[in-house]
Amino acid sequence: MMALQIGSTDELSTRANMRAIAAEFIATFLFIFLGAGSVVSLGFIADGDVAATVVGIAIAHGLAIALLVTATANISGGHINPAVTFAAVLTGRMSVYLGGAYVVAQLVGAVVGAFLLKIVIDSPFEGNLGAHALGPGVDGEAAGLLVEIFLTFALVFVVFASAMDPRGRGALAPIAIGFIFLVDSLVGIPLTGASMNPARSFGPSLVANFWEDHWIYWLGPLIGGAIAGFVYHYVFLPTEEPTHEPGREPM
């Protein structure tokens, strides 16, 4: 059983970890700009075609996460999501200090991405900058919370299976992660917006000052990610794992 690693502030000053933190900032900034940007763009070019809008947004998010994970996997592990980082910390795969630095970088990147999106979009079309809120088909906040838990569980379970499991096919991990994000989005966009990522919700919400049901998009992904991490780590991973540098699992 792997114990929680607290770590220290000293590890944040190493060159490798500084690069990793910078990679998480850049990747999350790009993910929010591209993902939330697809919501805004399709909102005014899809001409009210809801099905086309949902499919377009899902594809944009799935492709964006697959490409950005590929780009940053060998630098930071390609988390790009506080829920993934949270699961990695809870299962002892990286220290609390490094995980906290990742999350800060992700949140700051998300805000920058949303702010730059606001700058380039004409104000009559920006809406809520792709911020999340519950859809009309969801039966209340509790149901919305469960949707985010289930969607994030699926995402993080695939992350652990394809990227963190030493038996996984690491080269295919970005494709697997991109596809599960796409499928989750097809299911979840009409219900909750399919966040699965507190940073994806936080950046647009802060810049647009739109906080409707925002707590769901923190609690749901963190619970779902933690459960998936624990289940995969303690049920499916080999008892003896090869040594590794915390936070460097390819994703």
Image: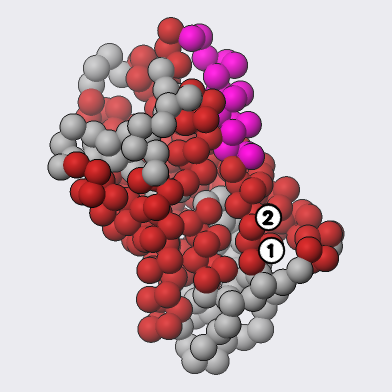
Q: At 59% from the left edge and 73% from the top edge, which residue is drawn?
A: 93
Location of residue 42 in the rendering, given as x and y in whole percent from the top left corner: 37, 22
On screen, residue 26 above or below 230: above
**Residue behind mark 2:** 101
On screen, residue 113 above or below 100: above
Front in this rendered view, residue 112 or 47: 112
Location of residue 195 in the rendering, given as x and y in whole percent from the top left corner: 39, 44
Specify few, some or many for label 2: CA neighbours under 10 Å numbering under 14, 14-19, or 20 or more. many
On screen, residue 183 above or below 97: above
Structural distance between the alpha carbons of marks 1 and 2: 6 Å
Range of the magenta residues? 108-123
Residue 147 visible to an observer of this rendering: no
Q: Are marks 1 and 2 in contact (CB under 8 Å)?
A: yes
Task: Please state if 94 lies on the left or on the right of 185 as rendered.
Answer: right
Which mark, residue 178? none
Location of residue 16 in the rendering, given as x and y in whole percent from the top left corner: 79, 61
Location of residue 80 in the rendering, given as x and y in whole percent from the top left corner: 56, 50
Q: Amino acid under label 2?
A: Ala
Q: At 54% from the left edge and 79% from the top edge, which residue is drawn?
A: 166
Question: Could you say whether the residue bearing mark 1 is in a helix, strand or loop?
Answer: helix
On screen, residue 238 above or below 217: below
Which mark, residue 97? 1
Task: Please state if 243 lies on the left or on the right of 167 as rendered.
Answer: right
